Image: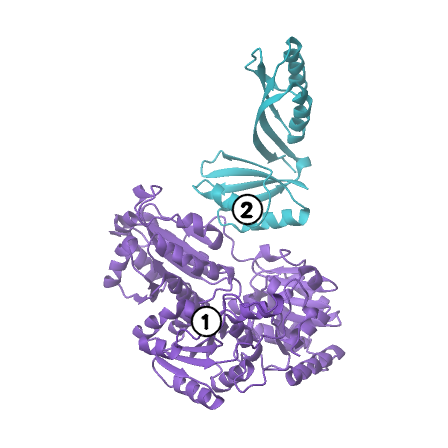
C-alpha cells in the first residue's frame, strides 16, 4: 500500500538523520520525504510516503513512535487528507506548436508556466503524486529534460 | 530545582552522577576525557580501570543487568569511543541499562577530522536508546538526569553522552533539575485489564497451553508473579535463552529454554502447544526457528513493555502492552478473584511431565569423564544457589543453557542478542561489583575468554574476585561444530593450538590459575576458587569433537530438532 506518514518532531539538529536511518536499518522504503518547520519553531513536520504492505506500515509507525525525538506519528488516511507535492518540469520544445500544446496541458492540470525559451519551457505543478505522474506521461512525448519534485506535504482534514 | 553553583562541565557531570547514585565508573582515560577523569580526585565515585574500552562497557553492562541500575562506562574520543561501540550494541540488543560517557574533540574542532575525532553520535545512533551531545556546559546536569531516566525506564537500554572537551572545562551556573520533561518519551503503558482477562480465558479454553518467559520477565523481576500464574493454571514453563532462569529450572513445571540449542523437552512441548502466553520476548529467530512454522496452529498472547515488539516477529491474537510484572499481577488478581487454582493434572500436563522425565533420563551426553554435561552439573552441585553466572558466547554457553539449572531466578546472564564473544568475563566483574556478597562465575570457552582476558588485570588490581570457568577445547567450538555439520568437516580458522596456557596466563596477572583434568580435580578447583579472595581461572581441557545437541538447524522449526545419536 501507498501510505502517508506525518511525523511531528522536535526541531533539533540530527533528527532527520535518525528518521531516515531508522528506515534504512529496519529495511523500510522511503518513497518521498519532505520536511519543514511548523508554526511553532520548536517543531518540524516530516512527511514521508512509503510503499509497504499494511503490516509493515503498522510496524514503521510503531518504530517511529518509539523514537524519543518524535512527538506525534500519524498514518494519514489519504481520503481524509489534503496532500500535495510541488514539481517543476523542464520540457523540450521541438516546433512552434509545442509551447502552445504544453501550455494547454499545464492549464488543464492547474500548472504555471515559467522560463519559456525557443528550445525549452518550464512548468510548475502542485498536485497529488498521481496527477503529477499523469502530467508527466502526457508531456513525455515532447521530451522531458529534467524534473524536480519536493515530496508530499500533507495535513489531515478537520473532523477527520 | 536546587540552588545554582558555578562549576565546570566535568564537575557538573560527576555531581549529577552522584545524585543518580553512581558509586563507580568502569573506564579508560584519554586526551579528550581528561577533565572528567580529573574530577575523580574530588568525588566519591570509584574508578575501575579496564584494559580495553569494550571491556569497560561490558563491565557496566554486567553491573546494570544485576543491579537493574544503569552501569556507567567512560571512554575517550576517537578509538576509545569506537571501541566502546560493541559494548553499547550488546547492551542494546539485550535491553540492558547503561550510560556511556565519551570525550569528544572541542566543539570548534568537530567536523575537521581532528586527532582522535570520531562521529560517535552518528555511529552509535542505531545501537543506542538515546544519545546526547551537549554543546554547552550548562546542559550537562539536565542531560545526565534525562540520560539515566531514559536508560532505566520502560524497556531499558544504553544511553550515550558525548561531551566535547571544552564543554567539560567550561564553567557555568549549574542547576540540577529534579523534574524534567521528555515530550516524545512514554516508557510505561498501563496494561489493558480487559485484554488480560481475555488472555486468561484463552488459556483456560486451550487444550495445550504453555508459558514462554523471555528476558523481559527477568528485567522486570516478575518472578513471583510468573510462578503464581504457572502454578495456579498448572502451565508448563519454557523460556527463551535470555529468559533462562526467569522460572526456577528445578521446578516440576519447568522445561528450560527453547530454541536452536533448547532443551529437547522444551522444544517438543513448545511445538505441541496450542496456546502460548509469551512474556517479555521479541520471538528471536534463535528462540523460535522460522517465524511461519512457529505461529502456525498456535494462539499467541503477547505481553511486552515495548509496543513495537507486538507483531514485529510474530502475530499475536491478544497483546498486552505494559510492564510484564504489572500485567502478570493483574492476571494473578483475576485468578484469585475467580478462585482458579488447578489441582488435577490435565492430560496435557501429564504428557508434559512424562516427556520431561523421558528426556531427563534418555538425552545422550558425552560418554567421557570430562564431558560438558558432567562438568556443568558438577559446577551446579557445588555452587550456592544464589551464585551469579555470566557466560561467554559459543558451545560452552549453550551447554550452560542445557546443563546448568538456574535455581534462584535472575541469576543467569549472557550476551544473547548480539552474541558478543568476550562479554562474559568483564560482565562478571561488573556483576561482582553489584553483588560482592555472592560468588560470580563466568562460564567461558577458550575462544571467547581470549577476547577480553586482559580484564584479569582489572579483577586482580581492583580486588574483584570472580571465577572464570573455561571449558577449554582449544578450538572455536561452535564454528567447528558448524564446519563439521554443514561444511563436510573442513576445519578452517578454528584451531587455537593450546595457546595460551591459561593457568600461566592467570598467574602472570596475579590471579590464581588451576587446571582440572578429572572430576576430583574439578571438585577441588571449584571449592578452592570459592574460598579464595583472588580472581581464579579454572582451565578444564575437554574433547574438541564434542557437539552441542540438541540442535535446531538455522531456517528450520523447533520440531526438526537434531538429537544426539
For residue B513, which quarter of the picture?
A: bottom left
Q: Chain of mark 1?
A: B
Which residue of the protein is positioned furthest toward the top in this rendering? Answer: A96
Observer-nearest of A60 and B30:
B30
Observer-nearest of B332 and B58:
B58
Write down which chain is painted purple: B
Image coords of residue B476 (percent x, y): 50, 70
Q: Which residue is mark 1?
A: B496
Write down which chain is painted cyan: A
Mark whose residue sits in front, 2 or 1: 1
Above/below status of A158 relative to B532:
above
Query: Position of B509 compared to B213: left or right?
Result: left
For residue B363, which quarter of the picture?
A: bottom right
Above/below status of A99 relative to B269:
above
Which residue of the protein is positioned furthest toward the bottom in this rendering? Answer: B520
Badge 1, how many Cα within 10 Å: few under 14, some, many 20+?
Answer: some
Q: Which residue is mark 2?
A: A24
Above/below status of B249 relative to A65:
below
Image coords of residue A88 (percent x, y): 57, 23
Amino acid at each position: 500500500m501507498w501510505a502517508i506518514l506525518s511525523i511531528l518532531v522536535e526541531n533539533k539538529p540530527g533528527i532527520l538523520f535518525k528518521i531516515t536511518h531508522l528506515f534504512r536499518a529496519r529495511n523500510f522504503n522511503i518513497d518521498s520525504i519532505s520536511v519543514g518547520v511548523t508554526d511553532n519553531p520548536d517543531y518540524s513536520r516530516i512527511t514521508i510516503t512509503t510503499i509497504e504492505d499494511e503490516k509493515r506500515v503498522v510496524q514503521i509507525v510503531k518504530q517511529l513512535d518509539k523514537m524519543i525525538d518524535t512527538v506525534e506519528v500519524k498514518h494519514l488516511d489519504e481520503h481524509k487528507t489534503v496532500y500535495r507535492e510541488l514539481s517543476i518540469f523542464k520540457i523540450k520544445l521541438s516546433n512552434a506548436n509545442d509551447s502552445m500544446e504544453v501550455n494547454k496541458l499545464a492549464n488543464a492540470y492547474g500548472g504555471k508556466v515559467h522560463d519559456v525559451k525557443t528550445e525549452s519551457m518550464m512548468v510548475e505543478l502542485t498536485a497529488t503524486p498521481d496527477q503529477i505522474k499523469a502530467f508527466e506521461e502526457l508531456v513525455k512525448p515532447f521530451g522531458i529534460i529534467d524534473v524536480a519534485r519536493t515530496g508530499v506535504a500533507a495535513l489531515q482534514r478537520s473532523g477527520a | 530545582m536546587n540552588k545554582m553553583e558555578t562549576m565546570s562541565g566535568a564537575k557538573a557531570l560527576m555531581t549529577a552522577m552522584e545524585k543518580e547514585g553512581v558509586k563507580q565508573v568502569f573506564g579508560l582515560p584519554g586526551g579528550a576525557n581528561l577533565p572528567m577523569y580529573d574530577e575523580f580526585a574530588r568525588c566519591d565515585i570509584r574508578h575501575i580501570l579496564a584494559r580495553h574500552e569494550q571491556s569497560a562497557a561490558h563491565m557496566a553492562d554486567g553491573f546494570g543487568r544485576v543491579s537493574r541500575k544503569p552501569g556507567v562506562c567512560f571512554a575517550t574520543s576517537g578509538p576509545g569511543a569506537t571501541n566502546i561501540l560493541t559494548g553499547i550494541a550488546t547492551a542494546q540488543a539485550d535491553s540492558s541499562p547503561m550510560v556511556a560517557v565519551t570525550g569528544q574533540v572541542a566543539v570548534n574542532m568537530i567536523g575537521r577530522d581532528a586527532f582522535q575525532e570520531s562521529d560517535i553520535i552518528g555511529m552509535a545512533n542505531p545501537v543506542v536508546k538515546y544519545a546526547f551531545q551537549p554543546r554547552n556546559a550548562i546542559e550537562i546536569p539536565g542531560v545526565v538526569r534525562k540520560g539515566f531516566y531514559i536508560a532505566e525506564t520502560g524497556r531499558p537500554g544504553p544511553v550515550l553522552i558525548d561531551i566535547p572537551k571544552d564543554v567539560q572545562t567550561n564553567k557555568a551556573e549549574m542547576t540540577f533539575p529534579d523534574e524534567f520533561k521528555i515530550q516524545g518519551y512514554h516508557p510505561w503503558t498501563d496494561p489493558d485489564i480487559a485484554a488480560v482477562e481475555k488472555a486468561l480465558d484463552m488459556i483456560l479454553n486451550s487444550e495445550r497451553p504453555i508459558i514462554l518467559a523471555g528476558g523481559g520477565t527477568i528485567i522486570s523481576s516478575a518472578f513471583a508473579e510468573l510462578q503464581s500464574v504457572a502454578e495456579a493454571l498448572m502451565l508448563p514453563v519454557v523460556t527463551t535463552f535470555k529468559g533462562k532462569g526467569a522460572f526456577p529450572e528445578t521446578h516440576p513445571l519447568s522445561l528450560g529454554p527453547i530454541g536452536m540449542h533448547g532443551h529437547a523437552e522444551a522444544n517438543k512441548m513448545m511445538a505441541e502447544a496450542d496456546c502460548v502466553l509469551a512474556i517479555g520476548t521479541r520471538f528471536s529467530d534463535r528462540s523460535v526457528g522460522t517465524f511461519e512454522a512457529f505461529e502456525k496452529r498456535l494462539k499467541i498472547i503477547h505481553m511486552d513493555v515495548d509496543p513495537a515488539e507486538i507483531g514485529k516477529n510474530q502475530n499475536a491474537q491478544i497483546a498486552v502492552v505494559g510492564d510484564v510484572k504489572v500485567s502478570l499481577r493483574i492476571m494473578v488478581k483475576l485468578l484469585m478473584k475467580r478462585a482458579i487454582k488447578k489441582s488435577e493434572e490435565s492430560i496435557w500436563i501429564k504428557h508434559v511431565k512424562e516427556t520431561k522425565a523421558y528426556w531427563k533420563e534418555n538425552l545422550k551426553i558425552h560418554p567421557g569423564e570430562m564431558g560438558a554435561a558432567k562438568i556443568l552439573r558438577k559446577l551446579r552441585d557445588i555452587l550456592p544457589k544464589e551464585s551469579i553466572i555470566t557466560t561467554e558466547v559459543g558451545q560452552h554457553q549453550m551447554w550452560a543453557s542445557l546443563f546448568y539449572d538456574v535455581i534462584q531466578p535472575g541469576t543467569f546472564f549472557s550476551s544473547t542478542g548480539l552474541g558478543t564473544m568476550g562479554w562474559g568475563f568483564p560482565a562478571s566483574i561488573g556483576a561482582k561489583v553489584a553483588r560482592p556478597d555472592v560468588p560470580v562465575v563466568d562460564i567461558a570457552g577458550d575462544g571467547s575468554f581470549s577476547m577480553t582476558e586482559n580484564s584479569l588485570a582489572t579483577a586482580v588490581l581492583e580486588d574483584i574476585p570472580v571465577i572464570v570457568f573455561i571449558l577449554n577445547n582449544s578450538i572455536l567450538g561452535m564454528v567447528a561444530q558448524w564446519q563439521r555439520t554443514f561444511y563436510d568437516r573442513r576445519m578452517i580458522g578454528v584451531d587455537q593450538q593450546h595457546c595460551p596456557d591459561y593457568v600461566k596466563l592467570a598467574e602472570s596477572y596475579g590471579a590464581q590459575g588451576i587446571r582440572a583434568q578429572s572430576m576430583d580435580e574439578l571438585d577441588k578447583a571449584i571449592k578452592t576458587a570459592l574460598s579464595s579472595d583472588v580472581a581464579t581461572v579454572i582451565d578444564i581441557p575437554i574433547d574438541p569433537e564434542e557437539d552441542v545437541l540438541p540442535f535446531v538447524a538455522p531456517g528450520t522449526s523447533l520440531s526438526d530438532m537434531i538429537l544426539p545419536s
